[in-house]
Structures are given as C-alpha cells and as structure tokens.
Image (tube, helix red, strand yellow):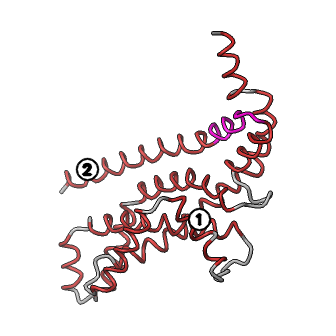
C-alpha cells in the first residue's frame, strides 16, 4: 500500500519537479495564457456583438447567416475548429498573420467564443423591457438609435457577469492551442507543462499546471457568482421600490 502511495506521489506530486517547472510556468506560460485569453475574448466580444445584432434581424438571409454561425461554431468540437482555423487558413493561402501561430490561436479561440458570446448578448438585449423600446420609438428614435442608446447599453450591462464567466472558459480553452505548435516564447501554461512531462516521463509538471489554472479560475468563479448575486439583489430592490 505504501509503495503504491509513494508511486502516486512520485508520478503526480514530485515536489522537486514541480519546483523546477514552476518558474517557466509563471514567467512564460502565465503571461502568454492571460494575453491569449484577453485577445481571444476581445475578438469574441466584437464578433458576438455583431452576430447578436443580426440574430433578430428581419432580413431572413442575415438571420440565417448569423444563426448558422452560432450553430456551427457551438456544434463543432473546439479542437477541430482550432485545427481548421489555425492550420487550415495558412494552408489555404490565407496567411493573415504570416507565420505568427500565436495570432492564429487567438483568432481561432475568439471565433469560437464569438458564437457563445452572441447568445449571451442576445439574451441580454432581449431582457430589456418592451416598454422602453416602444417609448424610444414614440420619441422618434430610429431602430438603430434604439439599439445603440437603449438596448445595447442595458443589455451589455446585464450580461457582464456571464461574459466574465465566459472569460474563465477562455482561459481553460487556451490549453488547446498547443496543437498549433507555438514557439518557445509563445508557449502557454499547458504547452510548457506537457513538454516538461514528456521530457521527464513524469506527470508532476501537469499537476503544477493544474494548480496554476485553479489559482486563476477558482477565485474568478467565486467573484462572478458574488457579482451575479449582487446584481440580482439590486434588481430585486429596484422592482420592490417600484
């Protein structure tokens, strides 16, 4: 029994190996992971907003294009989409970023997240009270002005916690970009940990990566949950005052 426990400790929790890989995880992997998540989230927000505005369009062709985008990107496995975009675009001659694999990785994750964020934005916009929309039209505002000044500000404000929660998923999803073959300076947390695990025939570096991911995502998860509770409480108070 003790021999088995010792083997588990050596395989997953080798303190010396964790201490050896942790500096690289903190100085190279962590900044690259956060930067990749931020870039992908910004792309996702822009794409998501555009798609969300097009989803309820009266033009059937635009509505079908937006709905198809959401259904396809949400329906495909993330690993497949990252391969198709990250490796497929350069092979097809669409070298948008030259040989910068990091940019293709951000684009791939951003386009995936755009489909999820589109639904988040759509739900937020649809939550705006119908009376406010009708009042804006009564005041002579165009449909675009109503969208810009009434619907979007309120809708986006209401979905900030879910968007932050989506950012947590982007951080975890960034682990898949190792498939695209990042350079040494571009490697994120998982890439560094996987390389070290392979070179040392030991999984302790992956345990170190897991601990670092948890240190990023768990506090953010609790913060998002607390934020959502505060917003629900504030909305409940406002309804009570009415």
Nearest the camera: 195 or 153? 195
Residue 31 horizontal/vertical position (percent): 71, 54
Graded by Cα atoms within 10 Å as few (under 14), some (14 to 19) or many (20 or more), the crowding at tag 2 reads few
What residue sits right under mark 2 in the picture?
A: 237
- Horizontal placement of 132 versus 106: left or right? left
Nearest the camera: 237 or 221? 221
Task: Calculate the distance from the C-alpha at mark 1 to the C-alpha at mark 2.
Answer: 48 Å
Residue 121 horizontal/vertical position (percent): 37, 67
Q: Quadrant of the N terminus?
A: top right
Graded by Cα atoms within 10 Å as few (under 14), some (14 to 19) or many (20 or more), the crowding at tag 1 reads some
| Residue sitting at x 31%, y 49% | 232
| Residue sitting at x 48%, y 59% | 77
Find out whether residue 210 is within the magenta segment. yes
| Residue sitting at x 79%, y 33% | 19
Residue 140 horizontal/vertical position (percent): 23, 90
Q: Which residues are magenta?
A: 201-212
Q: Is residue 132 above or below residue 165?
A: below
Residue 240 horizontal/vertical position (percent): 19, 51
Residue 83 got which mark? 1
Q: Secondary structure at mark 2?
A: helix
Q: Main secondary structure of the magenta part?
A: helix
Residue 213 got which mark? none
Marks 1, 2: nearer the viewer:
1
Find out whether residue 218 is within the magenta segment. no
Nearest the camera: 66 or 83? 83
The image quarter in which residue 200 lies = top right
Q: Is residue 209 above or below residue 166?
A: above
- Horizontal placement of 144 versus 226: left or right? left
Q: Secondary structure at mark 1?
A: helix
| Residue sitting at x 53%, y 62% | 80
């Amino acid at each position: 029994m003790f021999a088995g426990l010792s083997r588990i400790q050596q395989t997953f929790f080798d303190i010396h190996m964790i201490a050896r890989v942790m500096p690289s995880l903190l100085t190279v992997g962590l900044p690259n992971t956060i930067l990749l998540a931020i870039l992908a989230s910004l792309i996702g927000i822009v794409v998501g907003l555009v798609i969300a505005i097009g989803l309820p369009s009266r033009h059937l062709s635009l509505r079908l294009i937006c709905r198809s985008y959401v259904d396809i990107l949400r329906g495909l496995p993330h690993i497949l989409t990252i391969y198709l975009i990250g490796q497929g675009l350069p092979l097809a001659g669409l070298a948008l970023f030259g040989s910068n694999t990091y940019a293709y990785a951000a684009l791939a994750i951003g386009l995936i997240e755009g489909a999820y964020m589109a639904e988040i934005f759509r739900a937020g916009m649809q939550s705006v009270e119908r009376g406010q929309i009708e009042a804006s039209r009564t005041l002579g505002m165009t449909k675009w002005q109503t969208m810009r000044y009434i619907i979007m500000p309120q809708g986006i404000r209401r979905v900030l916690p879910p968007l932050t929660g989506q950012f947590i998923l982007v951080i975890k999803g960034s682990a898949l970009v190792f498939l695209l073959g990042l350079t040494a300076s571009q490697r994120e947390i998982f890439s560094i940990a996987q390389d070290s695990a392979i070179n040392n025939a030991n999984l302790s570096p992956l345990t170190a990566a897991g601990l670092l991911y948890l240190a990023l995502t768990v506090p953010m998860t609790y913060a998002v949950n607390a934020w959502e509770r505060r917003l629900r409480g504030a909305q409940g108070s406002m309804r009570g005052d009415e």
